[in-house]
Amino acid sequence: MQHKFEKKINDMFVDPIIFTQKFVKACDICICSGECCYYGVYTDKSDYEKILSVKERVIKYMDESQTKDVAKWFEEPEEDDDFPSGIAIGTEVHNGKCVFLDKQGFCTLQKMAYAEGEFKWKYKPLYCILFPLVIFEGVLTVDDEHLASMHYCSKSQNQVSTVFECCKEELRYLLGEKGFEELEEYREEYFKNLLKTEIKVEVSK
């Protein structure tokens, strides 16, 4: 069956909306308090196991707004082919936010990594890292439904950049340097073809 998206990188189709979708210039927790993290996130089984393997360290960096009861951190597993293991496990919501989000809007998993001199995203679930990007049914695209619910990032007056421009570091992390270079090439090709189409339409008027 032919897929409606033509470009594939690292076994994922690419939705070119990531090049044109307007977005904020950069993530700023001081403005939004990590609103995109309020609802929890689905994480791969391997990330779930990684987090639980350092649970005592995680607890050390939690504040009074978070539950330190490990049994209340995750939902029941479910099958999902968009996750490497085929199993997705959601993080629970506690006090109106993801269990790993502290009262200042910072991710405890990332805060711990920073404090202990590790790579900042070592323990952070992929979909937390990627937002507003998402992998849905094998397609790298924009999580427009989640984005639309944001009080800051969804407002047109704040969207002075694009998802692609804002998320270059995240895309490099996801695709690797070679994959990101391929994505940049596809972006150039996409806009060239878009321009040709616009010229043809103008000429035919």
Image (tube, rainbow, N blue to C red):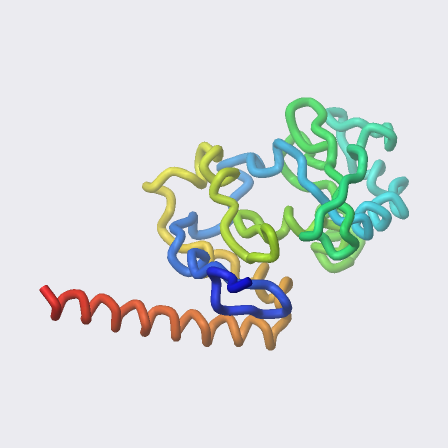
Outermost residue toward the front in this view: 1
Percent position (x, y) of residue 173? 64, 64
Quarter of the image for residue 175 reads bottom right
Asked if residue 124 is positioned above or below residue 3 in the image, the reply reads above
Viewer-side residue, 192 vs 95? 192
Asked if residue 168 is positioned above or below residue 108 in the image, the reply reads below
Q: Residue at x 81, y 48 (%)?
A: 45
Image quadrant occupied by the C terminus: bottom left
**167 left or right of 21?**
right
Percent position (x, y) of residue 56? 90, 40
Q: Residue at x 87, y 41 (%)?
A: 55
Percent position (x, y) of residue 106? 65, 40
Q: Residue at x 19, y 70 (%)?
A: 199
Viewer-side residue, 95 vs 75? 75
**167 left or right of 203?**
right
Outermost residue toward the top in this view: 95
Give the total number of marks visible in the rendering. 0
Image quadrant occupied by the N terminus: bottom right
Asked if residue 115 is positioned above or below residue 39 in the image, the reply reads below
Asked if residue 202 is positioned above or below residue 21 in the image, the reply reads below
Percent position (x, y) of residue 121? 70, 55
Viewer-side residue, 110 vs 127? 127
Q: Residue at x 32, y 72 (%)?
A: 193
